[in-house]
Amino acid sequence: MKISVIGCGYLGAVHAASMAEMGHDVVGIDVDEAKIAQLAAGTAPFFEPGLPEILRAGLASGRLRFSTDFADAASADVHFVAVGTPQVAGGDAADMRYVDAAFSSLLAHAKTGDLLVGKSTVPVGTAARLADLVASTVPGATLVWNPEFLREGFAVQDTIQPDRLVYGVPEGAAGEHAARVLDKVYASAVSEGTPVIVADYATAELVKVSANAFLATKISFINAMAEIAEVTGADVTKLADAIGHDARIGRRFLNAGVGFGGGCLPKDIRAFSARARELGKGEAIAFLDEVDKINLRRRTRVVQLASEAVGGDLAGKRIAMLGLAFKPHSDDVRDSPALDVSMKLADAGADVVATDPQAIERARMLAPHLTYESSIEETLRGADVVVLLTEWPEFVGLDPVAVGSLVAGKRVIDGRNSLDPAAWREAGWEYRGLGR
Ligand code: UDX
């Protein structure tokens, strides 16, 4: 099938390359010339395991190309819109200007019979509004909302083998036809028995934001338990294991620590709350404000633990930060707890030295005042406190005996509860976790 993908960021670049991998003829379009030049040269503009391989394979096969010209979408029959919806400056709502611009540029080149497929995470009601625009601009074209659930670090796998597909379609024959076309686009996933949920626009939009709200709530729930564990001497990791054995609860997303960050969960729960307030139903999801607050409190807690570890005054203390990305296997530092805590420690006068296997360059753009080291050894050298905030395997696997000789003070704060407290204590370290 002939496909265009509008927007070649984290979502769109992976989607375009995955569609080519699935056998389609794909053009990826973005207004960012530098990004398009990189992609066209077979280089992924961000770290995502598996993406460089399928990108290069797609380009070599001739099935994948990239362009900055929306006119190149004209030859495609199915157009995915995968642009970002970041948080607006100074507010909670989603900034819709990229979605609106993408649709208006695309509609100038779309034709009767085309399928326009929204993948961006949008406030509920957006698809209905855009469907009116599509109907009035290109009669006979159909809008579908097909939310994306990919996780960074597993984005290629999640796109090629999704755990479910959701199609938000209009009522009637046009909607039925659109669902059949999308089944063809996702033929390999559908034939493997991937569940396909066909719904109205509003449900499809809400599936995405409610899934992210649920995941964020699960994380903040366990982090709230961590706060209680801290004042009672309980161990939140054992608690999570114990409640996680209940199949109704499940152990995944119950890892207490410095909390969630990234380009999705934080801004999505805020945008959802803002939309609910607009709809006069703010009270229905007011708990999400609490979820956000619990999450941000964990960052302050890490700063407090670091301060306690050095006797109350961080000024001039050397803090070694292990991790900058919002999670392992990603170079993304958008709303990263690790980078936020690093900046808070620096604001408190600490001498912060940070490392990360992938995220240093992106962190440096946002926080040029911090010191960065590419080697773990140089980061740890002379440190008064070591703080682990992104659980990369190379950090989790550190030998507490071997690294003990590098630091000035054997104090470790395990912001992801991923080290073995017994092993670190045995090696002479003061170990502090979050809620354990
Ligand atoms: C998320 C959703 O998982 C995905 O379905 C959606 O499409 C986009 O948003 P992503 O942002 O890539 O994906 O990361 P995810 O793996 O969900 O982690 C989000 C944050 O939560 C990370 O900062 C992670 O460290 C944190 N987290 C996750 C916890 O603190 N504890 C956990 O138990 C799980």
Image (cartoon, rainbow, N blue to C red):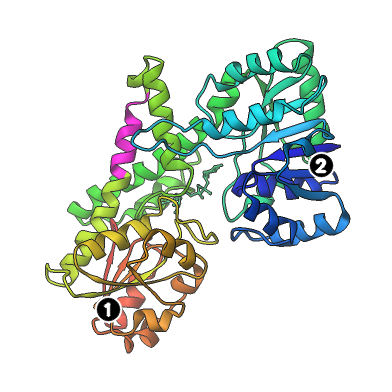
For the residue pair 41 and 55, the one nearer the viewer reads as: 41
Quarter of the figure with the N terminus = top right
Residue at the extreme bottom of the image, as rendered: 405
Q: Position of residue 434 (x, y in %)?
A: 29, 58
Q: Position of residue 349 (x, y in %)?
A: 19, 67
Q: Is residue 337 a member of the stretch shown in magenta?
A: no
Dot 1: element: loop
Left or right: where 13 falls relative to 219:
right
Mostly what secondary structure, the magenta segment? helix
Q: Nearer the viewer, residue 63 or 384?
A: 63
Residue interval drawn in magenta? 285-294
Q: Which residue is mark 1?
A: 429
Residue 49 lies left or right of residue 245; in this view the side is right
Disc 2, disc 1: CB below 8 Å?
Answer: no
Say if 311 sits above or below 234 in the image.
below
Residue under circle 2? 188
Q: Which numbered mark, 2 or 1, is in the foreground of this view?
A: 2
* Residue 70 in which image quadrant: top right
- Tell me the quarter of the picture where residue 197 sits: top right
Q: Is 252 placed above or below 410 here?
A: above
State which quadrant residue 24 falls in.
top right
Disc 2 versus disc 1: distance between alpha carbons? 51 Å
Q: Amino acid at mark 1?
A: Trp
Question: Which secondary structure lies at badge 2?
Answer: helix
Residue lying at the far left of the rendered structure: 312
- Tell me if I can see residue 395 in this picture: yes
Location of residue 28 with respect to 179 vertically, above or below: below
Q: Which residue is drawn at the image coordinates 66% and 59% (left, top)?
A: 44
Q: Give, as a three-letter code, the residue at label 2.
A: Ser
Is residue 288 shown in magenta? yes
